Amino acid sequence: PGVASDHQGYTGAGIAAGFQNTGDSLGFAVTVTDAGPYQLAVRYANAAGSDGQSTTRTLSTRINGAAGPAISFPPTSSWDTWQVASSG
């Protein structure tokens, strides 16, 4: 996994890409001002993967080392078509 910039419509410095193997991961540090529940929203594209399948993919999350909510990413029409999926 790493940062890529080869798909139209991404924002920022690039996209997190290359998650092809079971166990591939990426971490983000998030600081909040108040304790309590927060919703995680992820902007994604999910077309046919390296396995040739265009299928819903699931992201497992961890929060402070503990299992967090799973987020599902239904297929999009291309790797340049973006949607938003949220926890909770």
Image (tube, rainbow, N blue to C red):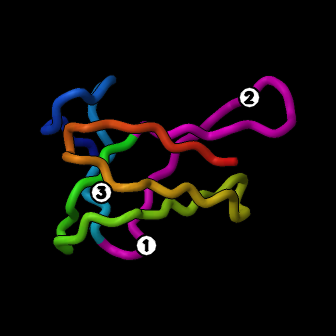
- Quadrant containing the N terminus is bottom left
Disc 1 on helix, strand or loop? loop
Q: Which residue is mark 3?
A: 1
In the rendered image, residue 44, in percent from the top left (x then y), is placed at 37, 43
In the rendered image, residue 64, in percent from the top left (x then y), is placed at 72, 53
Distance from Cα at disc 2 to Cα at disc 3: 26 Å
* Residue at (74% x, 28% y) in the render: 32
Distance from Cα at disc 3 to Cα at disc 1: 11 Å
Majority SS type along the magenta span: loop
Please say if 73 is above or below 55.
Answer: above
Please say if 32 is above or below 7.
Answer: above
> Quarter-wise, where is residue 69 in the image?
bottom right
* Residue at (20% x, 74% y) in the render: 51
* Label of residue 32 in the image: 2
Q: Is residue 37 left or right of residue 55?
A: right
Q: Earlier in the sequence, mark 3 or mark 1?
A: 3
* Region rendered in magenta: 21-43
Please say if 12 is above or below 66.
Answer: above
Q: Earlier in the sequence, mark 2 or mark 3?
A: 3
Disc 2 on helix, strand or loop? loop
* Label of residue 14 in the image: none
> Quarter-wise, where is residue 5 in the image?
top left
Q: Is residue 45 left or right of residue 77?
A: right
Please say if 63 is above or below 53.
Answer: above
Distance from Cα at disc 2 to Cα at disc 1: 27 Å
User: Callout 2: 10 Å neighbours few (<14), some, many (20+)?
Assistant: few
Amino acid type at circle 2 is Val
Amino acid type at circle 3 is Pro
Q: Which residue is mark 1?
A: 23
Q: Is residue 29 left or right of residue 7?
A: right
Amino acid type at circle 1 is Gly
